[in-house]
Amino acid sequence: MILQHIADGILSGAIIALGAIGLSFSMKILRFANFSHSELLTWGAYFALIFASFTAAFGPGLGNPVGPFSFGWKFLAALVFTAIATSALALVLHELVFDRLRRTANHMTMVFASFGVALLLRHLVLLLFGGDPIYYSNALQFAVLLPGGVRVMPDQVFLLGVTIVVVVSLHLFLTRSRTGISMRAVSENPDLARVSGVNVASIVRWVWIIGASGAAVAGLMYGMTVQLRPELGFSLILPLFAAAILGGAGSLYGAVIGGLVVGLSENLSVMIIPTTYKPAVPFLLILAILYFRPQGLFGERQ
Amino acid sequence: MIGVLSYLIFFMILALVFGIAVLGLNLQWGYTGLFNAGVAGFLAIGGYAMAILTGPSREAVFGGFELPFLVGLIGAMGAAGLGGIIIGLVTLRLRGEYLAVATFGIAVTIQLVCLNWEYLTGGTLGLIGIPNPTHELASAPLAQNAIFLAMVVALTALVYWGLQRIVNAPWGRVLKAIREDEIAAESLGKNPALIRLTSFVLGCMLMGLGGALYVAFIGFVSPFDFLPIITFQIWTMLIVGGSANNRGAILGAIVVWAVWTGSGYIISQIVPPEFQAQSGAMQAVLIGLILVLSLLFRPRGLIGEKLHVSRHAKL
Amino acid sequence: MTEPLLSIRDVHKGFGGFKAVDGISFDVPRGSIAGLIGPNGAGKTTLFNIISGLYSTDSGEVILDGVRLTGKAPHQVFGSGLARTFQIPRPFPAMTVLENLMIVPRPQAGEKFWNNWIRPGAVKAQEEELRAKAEQVLAFCNLTQVAGSEAQNLSGGQHKLLELARILMADPKIILLDEPAAGVNPTLMRDLVDRILELNAQGYTFLIIEHNMDVVMSVCDPIFVMAQGRLLYQGNAAGVRSDASVLDAYLGETI
Amino acid sequence: MRRLGKYVALGGLVAFLASMGNVMAQECPIKLGAILPVSGPMGQVGERISNTGAFAVEVFNEAGGVKNCPVEYTLRDTQGQSAVGVDAAKSLVDLEGVKALIGAVSSGVSLPVLTSVAVPSKVVQVSCCSSSESFTALAQEGKTKGYWFRTYATNRSQAAMGALLTTEKGFKNTAVIYVNTDFGVGLAKRYVEDIKKLGGNITSMIAYNESQQSYRAEVTKALEGNPDSVFLVAFPVDGATITREWLSLGGTDNLIVNNSLRSDDYFKAVGHQYLQNLVGYDSAQPRLPSVTTFNELFQAKFDGPPNGPGLHSVFDAVTVVLLAMEAADELTGDAIRDQIRNVTADGGIEVYPGAEGIKRAKALLAEGKQIRYVGATGALQFDANGDVQAPKMTWKLNGTENKETGYYTTEQVADLIKRLDK
């Protein structure tokens, strides 16, 4: 059974990792803990739903199933659509709320504002889409038995692949592109970066775009493997923070490893403790790690 | 007429019970800069301590000592304070959001313990029959609530006075110094670790007091009373009211609780019946909007911080 | 020869592979104004941070008046009689200048929170005392007119004076100043130097990091020169001027 | 403090003015308050319950209302929070002047409302859904003063029915997955006791916390020991997540589900085609033509059958309270409380849901006759603690229809419990 728990942990950890990347960047570069980040996952999932229903004329849900998967080529289009739409939403929030607050108040005020924004976003979903759970496809996908008695769903394996592609392209973006390099410079030392001619305002927008796109993909993945409901992101907020903080703010691979650690520890914990204590596991983990490394596993000491 | 009065009394009891917890948070955040996102956990400790100390004994559940109300209050503060010491020692070396996430996690863990450790907390059923002291003093519900309100007002006033005494004083000056520049304070001979811990523990004790009063008033305690949303509520009260100002904290508790509950009232009045089921979502949207707008346009809260700290150093 | 007041003995400190302080030893005589100079990145501020307890040492020790400071927390170091300022001043920005001073002395009865409940009289009396003393110090530092302002509204030079004034509240045995003259206009700087000389005459010992060579050469003796974490030279102003290794270290800069 | 005083006074004045209109209003319409979680994790369930409650009021108004006065249904959201629920209840009672309270859903909210609002204010509270054993304990201690009723049959009979169903189906090794609330814990524990007496075996007992992102770990754990069946105590949303993950990971489709999963939301979310081996139990509807009327009424109103947790029971809760109001001499809490058992008394003339049934009931009451309301959950019989016993039925899915497969009278259920409790 341990192999099954490990497989489950990696698969659920991948979703957490994708969501945590944006959170980690915003903690480091935007310099506040954005509690509304998880709502971007929710919106990402629902944007994909909107896409699917608008294009319903061209085939069901996310397209005619291809191979062992529950979706078709439309899935990729939905992925792009939701990333753009969610980024737009994030930029609107940035302009209307967070950017204004940055000028008038300290970063803790932004944290509280993000609480309020989260409440707002979550319940707007409830008002617009209702509280019923929704599925992209009602067909149930059955797990495939792998050697070692491990069962996984084909969709999940595909999504793990998507995660890897996203992380690798993010890595290339951060190390090769001009914007990515500037972004790292801003994260290291915003004042120095500003003096060296980096357009910090544009970098901040890029952080929102990257964070929102990651969240959108994570939300879509979550919606595909579990379900869509207004509390989708809210129920993930703790694991997301756990992953971002475990990894250390601003670290791409830190967030990914943090996500995997959270996913694995949650799934493995039920082998030793009652399932009812499971939600506490990521926290005890954070506490243990922060006790010894207050800056997170991959964070830099201040 | 009686109805309005009766409701107002009831409303004020809950608002001030929250107000006491807000005062505790104000000590931690407003004056010391400690981002405690685990308020619900300390309310829970206080609430359960009250239930265990003063409640009736139950089969297969610890406690039920049927001790007097006052013992319950002191015990609740003591338990929350003890919890504060342990948690503070583990977490207070963290800063900002890191402290927030750690304390948040602790509150979640406390709530899970309340939910699952049946021997101590009664588990999911909670603990019932916790005596409300005013029921022995009066028989009419209105009179009972009036007495309870008088008691809560007196306690709030006492807490307010006690806090004003210590924050508008050299002690409060050190808190503020640590909040503004810990390294400078340290280099001037202040011991930040000790002072942060003291402030944290005192704040936790007030949260415990708030939890105990809530439980005694409601007569029942269950894990579902201490969901993370309570922490959010208490924080909103502090930020809207004005952090680092004890009057602001109390005012914030009253105003935010009025908005929180009043928005339900208003929505139930203006929303047509066929959309009633959406009223909850509308209410939450409204609350979120009010919070964001108040932060945008009044980031210092209704009553902001005062410049002078010690009352002996006014110019 | 009298016992030195502050004694630094073979102090080492590295960050990762970089040796910021690499075996420094020197003594600050009682009653002196000692200068610590050296090019940027020589390790001067790191050494200050070690002496004042903000950094731990890798090895070596610091002795103040026979008491070992090494291993003590910053607030304990301060309690032993060593006070410091910062290169970039660190006042408590949202506090009044007066209270920036009143906070310093210890022990204060009112810093134990319960005393504010049970002994309000004693707290009040002490606060009045502190206030009187603070007003004196403010007058000495020419800050009386800004006593009621928020510290963050002061000018850069006034911040330096405020830091010095804050330290004076505690009557330390030795005062460490980190670049007191940096970014200060000439009039205020003269003021500052006068205060230092006056305090030295009253018996205060100083250890000063400074880049302004006019100030160093006119007031400091002995002078310690650091470069790349090591002590390059120690002696008086004349010796520093004539020493070849010092000139090398400062190549391109005028002494 | 002076300024603070002013703010408080101002707030008070505003609240006072806002509520003047309501307090001074005439006795018509009669207000019925509902405190339900229409947002938050239980929002989906709460919303449907609320709509059904409003529907019951509508039906009653069609029959002329209470004492020729239209009834106004006033809903307040609890957000699933006890403090908010308590305040909402108090404001309904004091400011709106409601004559009785319906709700709440979770016991964690219903209990504080009962002890701090309903009992002190002498207002009848009827819950559709709260299942905690604490209510029975409170009632036995005399602390509810009789103001508490619930139309939801207690866990005791549910657990017995679940165990009976499991063993009758011939399952030997059953995994239990249950929601970690007073409802789920109470039910699951009883079920395990009962099934052992009936000769079954439990492979694992897995509690799950509500509203989590995924339940794979719980499901994987429950799969250990190769159960031939699973007993699931859950609400539709989380229940669907668990069932989908369970089936995906190769779990058996021999599902025994609690009545809270007899919901189209659940069937639809999982997919009917996967649930053809699912069996369940529920409180039975009386086998009378009038029930069809109720079902038809509901179908017409909501465009779907009344499947879902709390729908039948909230309909009955509202109807019983309104009938008791009709029967009461005056609209005080005490009078309404005393009439609730009278309008459901054994031996009264039976009346059924729907406008016609209500009209008949009102006519009978006007004649001074004793009536017995037989409602959507069956013939309600409140015991001294305000708990209700109801006949039971078993059901299964057949295509997309859910079909009754067995019927157990109140007496049969009582016998079963007696047998198990020996």
Image (cartoon, coloured by chain):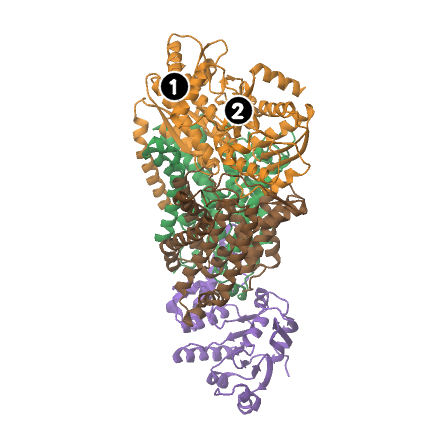
Chain colours: A brown, B green, C purple, D orange
Q: How many marks?
A: 2
Nearest to viewer (mark 1 / mark 2): 1
Vertical comparison of A66 with D39: above or below = below
Q: Helix, strand, or loop for circle 2?
A: loop
Vertical comparison of D334 with B231: above or below = above
**Label 1 neighbourhood size at 10 Å, few (<14), some (14-19), many (20+)?**
some
Vertical comparison of B74 with C156: above or below = above
Vertical comparison of B24 with C222: above or below = above
Quadrant housing the N terminus of chain B: top left
The answer to whether residue D270 of the structure is visible from this angle is: yes
Q: Which residue is mark 1?
A: D331
Query: Residue D45's x, y, as percent?
Result: 47, 32
Q: Helix, strand, or loop for circle 1?
A: loop
Query: Residue D330's x, y, as percent?
Result: 38, 16
Name the residue rendered at 40%, 12% in the picture.
D361
Callout 2 amino acid? Lys
Q: Is residue C211 left or right of residue B292?
A: right
Q: Which residue is mark 2?
A: D143
Q: Quadrant of residue D24?
A: top left
Callout 1 amino acid? Leu
Q: Is residue B188 left or right of residue C58?
A: left
Quadrant housing the C terminus of chain B: bottom left
Query: Residue D198's x, y, as percent?
Result: 68, 23
